[in-house]
Structure formats: C-alpha cells, structure tokens
Image (spheres, helix red, strand yellow):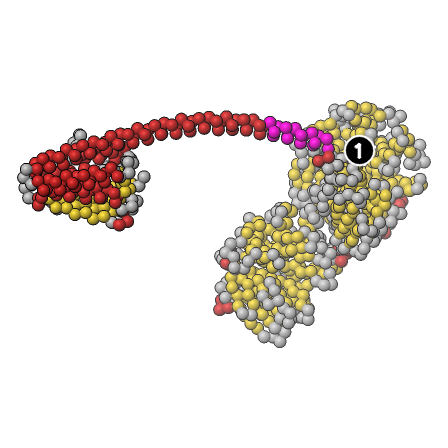
Amino acid sequence: MTLLACLLAFQFPSETYDAANGLDSPTVLSVHAHQAGRLWVGTYEGLLSFDGHEFSHASQLPISRVRRIVDGNSVNWVASFSGLFDLSHAQRVTELDNVYDVLETDEGLWIGTGTGLFLFHDDSLTAVDLGLESPRVLRLVAFQQGMWVGTDQGLFRFENGGFENIQLTSWLAAPAVYDIATSLGVTWFATDLGLVKLERDHLTHFAVGEGLPHHAVWCVTIDSRGWVWAGTDAGSALSKSGARFATVNPSDPLGYTTIYAIEEDDEGSMWFGTCTGLIHMVEPLVNASLDLAINTSGILEHSSLGLLRGTPQGIWTDDSFLLEAPFVRTMLESRDGSIWAATREGVIKRTLAGEIVVFDADDGLSDTHVLHLARASEKQILAATLSGLFKGGMDGFERMPWSRNIRVHGSIWEPDGIYAATERGVLFSDAPTRQTARSLLDEEAFCLMMTKRYGLVTGTAHGLVTLPEGTRYSPETRVHALAEDEYGNLWAGTNRGLERFTGHRLSRVWPHEGSLESNLNALQYLSDERLILGHYDGSIAWDTKPLSASNTLRGQSELTAELGGQPLTNNTSFTQASDPFKIVFKASSLKYTHHYALEIQQNDQTWRQQTNPLQVSRDVVGAHQLKARATFPDGSHSPELKFGWTIKPPIWKTPWFIGLCLLVLCVLAAREMRQLRTKNQFLALQARELADRFAMEQAERLHREAEIRMLHSQMNPHFLQNAFNTAIAQLKRAPDQTEHLLRQLAVFFRRHMQANPDIWATVSQETELAESFLSIQKMRFNDRLSYHIHVRDEARALRIPALMLQPLLENATLHGLKQTTDSVEVSLEIDTVEEFVEIRVSNDGDRSLDHQWIKEGHALDNIQKRLAMMDQQPLTYSFAQNRHLFILRIGQP
C-alpha cells in the first residue's frame, strides 16, 4: 500500500528555508505573496519579509503568532495573537487580542478572534452573535453575495444581513473550519475532519481514503491552473482534477510534516508554511542533458555548422575543434557564414572554406585580449577588450575615444547609439567619435541586453538592473550573462546558477538532479527552445518549453468589456489586440475626449495602465466605470479590471473659477491704479526737482560767465595802457611810427569789437588779434623783438577762450625783453592733439624766472582763473634749451 501511494504521489523539487537562512522561527503559520514581488512570512515569533534570497523584519511592531496577512483596500492587515495591526501605518487597530482573520466589506471591517466575531465600523467595535458559546472565528472569506465564516464549531454563511449555519457533514459534531478557498463557483473547506467540496449546492467529503495524508486539514489553496493543494497534519496533498488527491513529495518534509499555509506567488511557485520552516516548490525544467564537459565561455548556433562552443582551447563542434585559439568567448556569424571569435590573441575570423584571418595590434586592435563581440552593422562589429571598445571589420579596427583605458565586458549597438557594460558602469555614446560618454549606471556591469519586455537590462555584482530608471532586483545575486527566449522570458546566469527574471526578482531554476552551483558566463537560447548554459565545468542543454508554455500567453485571447453597464464590441470606439506577451485594448466613448489604453501581462496576471485618461470634458460629466476581463486560450480568466473615473466640466466653466477670475481682475485693477497714482506723484516730484536743479545750474552758469567776462574786461585796459605808453614815448622821437602804432591799435580794437561777444572765439579770430598785438609790440621794441606764428589748418575752425593768446604773448614779450639787452624771439604754435587744441608760446631768455611765475593780479593769474572757471586744464610752464615755454590745452565746449 505504501509502495502504491509512493507511485501515485507527486514529486517536485523543493528547497527549505530555516534558521540557517535567517528564519526567526521554524513554525511558519502564514505566507502571503505581496504585489511588489516580495513574500511576507508570518511565524510564531513575528512578521518577516523575504525577497527570494534573505529574510528581514517587516515591522518593528510587537507582533507574534502571525496567522493571516491580508491586502485591504488601502492598508495591509496583520492578524496575530498580539492583536490586529495596520501594517501600512504601523499601528494597532482596536484592543482585541488573539485575532485569527480580518476581512473588509461594505459593512465595515470584520474581525475573527478567539472570543468571537466583531465588526469594526466608524471607530466603533460591535460583537456579532453567531448563536454559539465563545466560538473561535478562524477564517473569513468573501463570495459574490456575502461572506463565509469558519469557526471551531462549524461553518456560517453571511448573506442578506443574516447568518446561517451550514451543515458540512452528517456527524452530530460540527467540524472546525480552518481555511476556505473558492474559485469559479466551487468552494473548498479545510476542516479537522477532512476536506469538503461545495459545488452547485452539493457537498463532497475527502478524507484519508481519497488520498489525503491526514484527516486534519489546516489549509487549502486553488492555484492559477485550477489545481487544489491541501495542507494537513501529516504533509501536503494535490488534486489536479478536483476528484482525488495524492501526496506531494512523500520522501521529504512536504510529505510528512504539518502544513499550516500554502500560497502561490506571482510567478507560479508554491510556498508552504510548515512546522519545520518555509518550503519553496518550483516546476522543474525538464530534459536536461550534459552538453560538453569542458569549460564553456561562448556559444553560437551557426546556420550550417550547428552548435559551436567557445572553450579555452578553441571552437568546439560536436566531435572536434573547428578552430584552435586561446580562450574563445563570444562568437558571431556573418552573412556569408564566416565566424568571428573573441580570443586572447585578438579577433579571429574563420570562413566556411577554412581561411583564418587574425586581427591584432597591426590592424588597430591595440589590446588583443578580447572579452566580447557585438554586431554593429552588416560589415562592422564591436570588440570589447581589457582597455577599451573597438569598432571595425575587414579594414581594421579603431578605438572609441571615450573608452580609453576602460575594461569593457560587453556592448550592444542600437539605433540611438552604443551601450557598453564596463568596469565603471554602463556607458552610452550617440557618436563613435565623441570624446566622452554618458553614464547610465555608476557600478561595474558584466553584461547588457535590450529585451522585448523589460527594455535595457544589465547584470551587476549586486543583481539585475533595468535602465534608464535604475530599478534593481535581487541585489544579493551576481549576474554574469543574460538570454531572452521567444516568449519574452529573461534568463540569467548568476553565481547561484540559472535563474529566471519574473518581473519582480530573479527566481532560481532547479534541474532534476541536484542544483547548479557555478558561475554561468555564457547563455544562448536556440531555435528549438533549448537553453545552452556555459559554465566552468562545461555546458548543459535545457528544454525550456514546459516552463515557457505554462507562463506565456499563446495565440489570440478574447477580451470582454463594458462601459457604463453597456458591452463594448470591436468598432471605432473599442479596439483590442494581443501578442505572446500582452493584451492591449483602447476605448473611447460618450463623445468626449476620454481615450486610454491598458495592457494585461499574462506572466503576473495584473493589469497595468499605459496612458492616463483625460479628466476634462465639454460634453458629459459624472462618474463612469470600465469593467474588462481577458479569457485565455486555456480557458482561464484574468482578474477583472474595474477602472473608474470622474469626468469633470472644463475648469473655466465652474462658478468658483469664474468668481476667482473676477476677484483676480479686481485686485489687479486696484493694484494698477495704485501704481499709477504713485507713479504720477513720483513724476511730479521729479519734475519739480529737475526745474529747481535747472534754475540753479542756469544761475551758476550765468554767474561763471559774468566772472569770466569780468576777467576778460581786465585784459583790455592793461593792454591799452601799455600801447598808449609806447605811443607817448615815441611821439617826439618818431612821429611817423607813432601814427602807424595808433593806426594799428585802432585796427586791433576794431577787430576786437567785431569779434563774437561770447567768451569763446575761433582759433582764426584769436590768431588775427594776436598778430595785430605782436605787430604793435614790434613797433614799440623795433629790432629787439622778432616773432613768428604757425597755425595748423585743421585747428583754425576750433574754438578757444577769447583773449587767451594776447596775455600769453604779452608775458613772453615783456618778460623776455626784461631779462636781456639782446633781441628776443617770440613763437606762437597752435596744433591739434587728440581732442584738444594745443597752444605753445615760447621766447628766448635765461633761467631767471623762478618757480613763482604766476603772481596774484598778473596776466597769467588771470588766465589760470579763467581756465579753472571753464573746466579746462591749467597752464603749464617749462624751460629748455634757453627758451621759456608755456603750453595750454583747450578742450572743445
């Protein structure tokens, strides 16, 4: 009998997690697969979180004997001996102890405890009377019309506001109901007297005679395939048809230990909470076979030569070496069937005819230790080496400038540029000649792949990372190689062996005979759906069809949907499409611009919104809801999507917005008027200040001009006195000369009176007056005085202060004759220097003129004062080469 039971039993590979793996207690009372891909484990000591590799405490709350973990509408509930806890907000709910289960419904929060059933609503706790004396409420499960209540004194059904006791067996004593599972109209009850199936109001009892290992059944679960799993006091049992059970793994703990909880995660793996730890069961890959017992670091499926393996000795075919070369890694096949191989001696090309071409330093490949090859175009490849990334082909190779002195493990060529896995992280360059590359990940990356389902992924020493968002999965795992099958499954060669990426974490895959504990550095998916794994001990071929078929959507699937209670059909407002990876549908209706698309992934059976709906419409407003469910070719259904939204009127039509706009306009108008008033006051004040300033400046200007004219008038009497003295002295001695002197004096004053009455005069006017003055002085001193005047033509039209030359010439004449009895030469030169008129007056003499050459009341003092009032440079004096020199620079007014 025992032999027959073993023959009929189910055998699955499994792995046990206990204290050696970080489990805080050997007794696991509950297991819950969280939507984020993590596993919550409730033990006798507390609540743990498990990411597939290690355990961590999920909460610091004082929780013990965790019996149930439930995803609520907005919180995560934990039912335990210590009470009911809201894990999302890290707080205890109510003062109830010894809680077994919790369920959220429209009525409120139902709580099953060791002292009865309670309803928690609006912060009020109410005890519910089931007509029993101190019942222990062990399980609460909702169904379409109500709720199942499992107690230690029987089963109750809550419907239409009342409770009804359900007789499960014909025995007088009602069994204790520990667990309830329902699916597609069939409900299973786990009791201490066996397993009971309710289908179409008909009850079927299962006990030891129907294949259960023990009559006490602690838990029951229906997986995504419709299989029924039962956990008993003496092991687990499985029924694929729902008719008869068989023991699972009778030779290991799953077949004989107490099973408290059974849970299916989002990747189809089964987890068992037992009295000896947490047990994980996975469907195995079948038809595994040893392919080659030689270190395999590269794999290529050649179109005509079949399967080729890269080894430390060369390229191996089925029975011999096709090419002998050191440490062959990646291999590529060109269009003509030639093989390109990455080796430690460079890139080697072998044609189908057997011709060998080696590309090394002479061909631009300065580093011949090649780690990886990738196709860049039909005629060019990328070669990753210890010191950079090279691009080339038959014409040679050249290094990418941004990769100099960087160890490159691998690369891929995409339309937008080159991605490289390097010792410095993942680098991206959109131009081969660019000197720098953009960093997408700042840690060493070993491999890269552009996948159909997950986009760009890379393997690192700390798990798998998706780019560019940088999301990390299984950080405890070192990922060396990646491969993708035709169904979009992503496989990884890691330091733990072969693993499959589920979308949430890396899940280890077990062969039939023992586990693979080596670094996988080569992965290749073949056209016959085999996966070749290359590792240090050789290569192994795996048949992935069973696992791919059970986790991948095949063929077309049907989608039924309704919007606002009305069915949607394929027309202009509703379209759907499916491929091996997802179902996508788009819907728009009710004449408003509400257009959205969602997709369902078969792997994890969850809906994912792709584009957000618009929330504004000019036509229809109100609340709307979309319901949709996918039916797959195998007859299974996806979870029903319920997507609700509210259409709001345009914001510019709402009363509060119109009122707000009017208020803003009033505030802006008042602010503008206040600013205008302030601005007018400021302008008026500024106008008064400008008028006062103009009047002051005008008065100051008139005052300065009056002072200048006064100094100007002082010059004429002085000159007139000197001229008359000269005429008187010569009247008796030379009357003709005296007459000529007086006539010249008349000409001088006539020119002076004809001049502009302004304080400024042109250089030409002043030169004429100066020449009249010197001629008069010449008559006075005869041969003792000689003079010459030189004026540049460009300076004649420029302006200088009136009567500025006469006192300078008078000073030069009189003081020059006073110092000597010989003749004196007086010189007048007028030129332009930059923006100034430069006047130079010089005469003969000795250095008897002391430093006080300007004396109060003299002509030169008069000149200095006039220059200061007119904001001009002062007069300068120097003595050189026995000549006195006065220089005056006049700026134009």
**Residue 513 relative to residue 158: left or right:** left
Q: Position of residue 513 (x, y in %)?
A: 72, 55
The three-letter amino acid code for the residue at tag 1 is Leu
Residue wearing tag 1 = 103
Question: Element at badge 1?
Answer: strand
Residue situated in front as seen by the camera: 552 or 728: 728
**Residue 493 relative to residue 775: left or right:** right
Up the image or down, 534 lies above or below 715; here it is below
Residue at the (74%, 29%) spot, across then down? 84
Quarter-wise, where is residue 645 in the image?
top right
Q: Position of residue 467 (x, y in %)?
A: 62, 50
Quadrant into which the C terminus falls: top left
Q: Residues within 10 Å of mark 1 (few under 14, many from 20)?
A: some
Outermost bottom residue:
353
The answer to whether any part of residue 245 appears in the image is no
Residue situated in front as seen by the camera: 101 or 747: 747
Quarter-wise, where is residue 531 in the image?
bottom right
Residue at the (32%, 30%) spot, across then down? 702
Q: Position of residue 619 (x, y in %)?
A: 78, 40
Residue at the (18%, 34%) spot, across then down? 859
Up the image or down, 152 lies above or below 468; here it is above
The answer to whether any part of residue 438 appears in the image is yes
Query: Which stretch appears magenta?
Result: 654-670
Residue 669 lies in the magenta stretch: yes
Classified by dominant secondary structure, the portion drawn in magenta counts as helix
Quarter-wise, where is residue 349 in the image?
bottom right
Q: Position of residue 249 (x, y in %)?
A: 78, 48
Residue at the (57%, 28%) spot, across then down? 673
Residue 486 lies in the magenta stretch: no
